[in-house]
Amino acid sequence: MQKLPETKVIYLYDLPKQITTSTQLAKLIKEQTGYTLEHQPQVRRDPNRPFYSAMIKIDNPDKFHEVAAKLRYFTLEGKPCRALPYKPELLGQNASKLQNQNVFVRRIPKDVKSDELESFFK
């Protein structure tokens, strides 16, 4: 029996509410990664959060890793955003998960970029 290719999902977050659409995300992904999505991005619009999030599905494992790496940090209309491989066990409202998986840092200078912080904390 032949094994089916693993489906991969990338989770995009910190997307600006006023300007984020599925069409815009597909265009941005094409421009920044050279990859044309086979599936429309699914934008999650939660009115209780200051930003939107989205999920994109990429069936090809090689393309998945390439797109995920290129989208790690990106901007949408000048606003900083992030993308990570989707891991349901790291998301949600479970306080113990947040405490065990996240580091909270205060008083970071406004001119520090996300990739600089990640490099510093590695």
Image: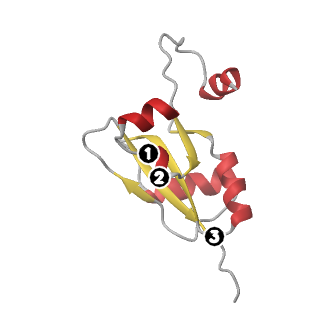
Q: Nearer the viewer, residue 35 or 117?
A: 117
Q: Residue at x 57, y 15 (%)?
A: 111
Residue 38 x/y as whole percent: 57, 71
Quadrant where the image shows the N terminus: bottom right
Residue 54 x/y as whole percent: 45, 52
Q: Secondary structure at mark 1?
A: loop
> Which amino acid does the dot numbered 3 rest on?
Glu
Left or right: 118 as drawn, with respect to 96: right
Q: Residue at x 51, y 50 (%)?
A: 11
Mark 3 residue crowding within 10 angstroms, few (<14) / some (14–19) / many (20+):
few
On the image, numbered disc 2 is attached to which residue?
A: 88
On the image, numbered disc 3 is attached to which residue?
A: 6
> Which amino acid does the dot numbered 1 rest on?
Leu
Q: CA gap, disc 3 to disc 1?
A: 21 Å
Q: Nearer the viewer, residue 116 or 98?
A: 98
User: Which tag, 3 or 1, sits closer to the chain's start?
Assistant: 3
Residue 103 x/y as whole percent: 52, 25
